[in-house]
Amino acid sequence: MTIPAHETAGARIVVPVALEGRPYDIHIGRHQLCETAALIAAMAPGAKVALVTDESVAALHAPALEACLQQESITSTRITVPPGEATKSAAQLIALCDALLAAKIERDDLVIALGGGVVGDLTGFAAAVLRRGVRFVQMPTTLLAQVDSSVGGKTGINTSHGKNLIGAFHQPVLVIADTALLDTLSQREFKAGYAEVVKYGLIDDPAFFDWCEVNWSRIISGGPERDHAVAVACRAKAAIVARDEREEGDRALLNLGHTFAHALERLTNYDSTRLVHGEAVAIGLALAFRFSQRMGLCSGQDAVRVSRHLDAVGLPTTLQQVPGGAGTAQEIVAAMGQDKKVRRGVLTFILARGIGKAFIAHGVATEEVQAFVESEFAGESGTANASNAGRAR
Amino acid sequence: MTIPAHETAGARIVVPVALEGRPYDIHIGRHQLCETAALIAAMAPGAKVALVTDESVAALHAPALEACLQQESITSTRITVPPGEATKSAAQLIALCDALLAAKIERDDLVIALGGGVVGDLTGFAAAVLRRGVRFVQMPTTLLAQVDSSVGGKTGINTSHGKNLIGAFHQPVLVIADTALLDTLSQREFKAGYAEVVKYGLIDDPAFFDWCEVNWSRIISGGPERDHAVAVACRAKAAIVARDEREEGDRALLNLGHTFAHALERLTNYDSTRLVHGEAVAIGLALAFRFSQRMGLCSGQDAVRVSRHLDAVGLPTTLQQVPGGAGTAQEIVAAMGQDKKVRRGVLTFILARGIGKAFIAHGVATEEVQAFVESEFAGESGTANASNAGRAR
């Protein structure tokens, strides 16, 4: 697998999301702020813009984007929310809607989400419900958001009952993945996003997983490998979303590793000093493959290969690596019970018959899961990972 | 215009709402609680039910419905919200979502809204955003809700900036308009709902308006006229919603009288002791016709006929009849500026060329509106209504 010639030239890559009646494009490449303003001016002539961002991102990127908007004579109002997962709350949602109404954002105007998954999910949800729906543009500023949360229209907030339990499907009209914005990410944040990149290889693209094993350090350092990886991920997600927008079938495959991940995030109180989403996903991916191995579905070789790669990148792959502990096996299984993927009390899991061979397994017995988690705590997770225990980040 | 034979027999009337991909039926008739339970059991075998209602309605109808659900072996949890427009708040929305999550309502379960427009709008919105969308059934218990808010999927809450400014389009899977439930309504509440009934005649069905002029007292007292009126209204609304679900065109016709009404409700702080929605709509309808007359669009005869009929029923038709006052002309026009129907600062009004000849007028100048409202305050609204001033309810 090599990078196509037109991508190595550093040109912008456009990935269409073919949703019937509401198609949109994802633009991937470096330094696109002013192109974005031009696209918006063409898409919504005369529209006002509300630029929603968080305090950290605002300091880095908001003035440059605002200058580009001004060049296109677009009136914009900046709305800043606090950084961090706690911002995905009902209180922040209402405050944001109030701020958008105060900015007199109407049905024909545009809301831009400039930030990571938190800003994108919160802003997308606010755009979904403000005046029963206004248009919005995703400008993801983290790798995680560029390859996952900004594409596909899932928006939402967390509640005391769990993550994303209140939300809407609301598709953006445009996604701008400016890969230059990722240069300011910390190593930890970049690597966390990388877990979602490698996930696409694990689901159904073994050649991409092979390529990641060789090229991961160049994805992190930047250059055409980064843009290519983002494009592969977006194409994979766009294809799944186009055939199953509302997760009534295939889209659930994207949750590979996520049932475990959500439980771990819940048990660490969404405290990013302990565990960020991508780290939870890395552990979840490793667990999903070892669970598949235990169920006799997947070879031990593939399970080890998954953990070894994530480990090489510097991502956690075991429950022991959750700082402060992940709770007991019983607590983990109970935390899974509040997942949206639960139907009639039965867990739906994404399991794998090997790398690139993920599938949706309905009706996984909670006893099986609990026995597996207990075995993980007992340190039966294989030598490749045991060596990694206690060495989080 | 006479009632069709199959309606006079007291049989249930089924009005289909032909939305592509999400069609549903409205069942109109008396004593349908146990039929409803049977329909739900057939529609969602094994589903849990959350029954959302308000304290007043709960006392009247919840035990009977719960007994019917129990007969069908449907597990139900009752969730009660306070009665009144103030319940359409962000705080109540979040509390309701929390209660639905605590009741472990999942994607395959059902939420029933048993109540008036407040319960229907709040519950429908909660169902729209809970786990990004669960199914819900509308069981409207007021005339207003049966002929208007329960049909068409508009859900939402109010904010300090205005009414229904946060919400979603979320269609019910079933609407049960049990006309026997209306027997417990106060005369005031019934008449307020009647304003929305007569609106359908004013929009595009002059024969129905003629029929209403003759039969209105029988609609209030019950019997086949009531069921027929609800069915005509639902059919009219279903037809408009089917061709324009998201109000990008024709659906705006349903707002006849509502731009004025929303402003009046806002200026009376949604205080139902002063003005309920249907009363505001009655004034709004009379104003819309007199404004149309002033613009040279509609005959004075038609404008007078509209006011005279609403007056005969006992509904208010002038700004002078707003208890405590409706504010100044300037305040009324300013209050209109926060309406969802505003685009780029220009008001969209529903005007009429006569009874049954309503149309969407884009770009009505606010100066015109203000001059008209000033003339209304000056008592230039015609002898038919001047006699009614100060005699609210």
Image (cartoon, coloured by chain):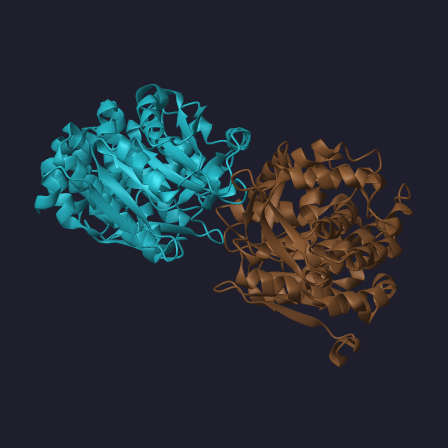
Chain colours: A brown, B cyan
| Residue placed most toward the observer, B170 or A66 | B170
The residue that appears at 63% across and 45% down in the rendered structure is A122
**In the picture, residue B136 is in which quadrant?**
top left
Relative to A87, is B86 on the left or the right? left
How far across and how far down the image is residue B21, in percent? 39, 56
| Residue placed most toward the observer, A291 or A166 | A291
How far across and how far down the image is residue B267, in percent? 42, 31
Relative to B105, is B188 on the left or the right? left
**In the picture, residue A162 is in which quadrant?**
top right
Residue A282 visible to the viewer = yes
The residue that appears at 53% across and 59% down in the rendered structure is A244
Relative to A352, is B39 on the left or the right? left
Outermost residue toward the front?
A296
Relative vertical location of residue B258 with respect to residue A211 in this rendering, above or below: above
Residue B149 visible to the viewer = no
Outermost residue toward the top?
B59
Q: Quadrant of the N terminus of chain A?
A: bottom right
How far across and how far down the image is residue B328, in percent? 40, 33
| Residue placed most toward the observer, A330 or A69 | A330
How far across and how far down the image is residue A46, in percent? 55, 61
Relative vertical location of residue A11 with respect to residue B305 in this rendering, above or below: below
The residue that appears at 61% across and 39% down in the rendered structure is A93
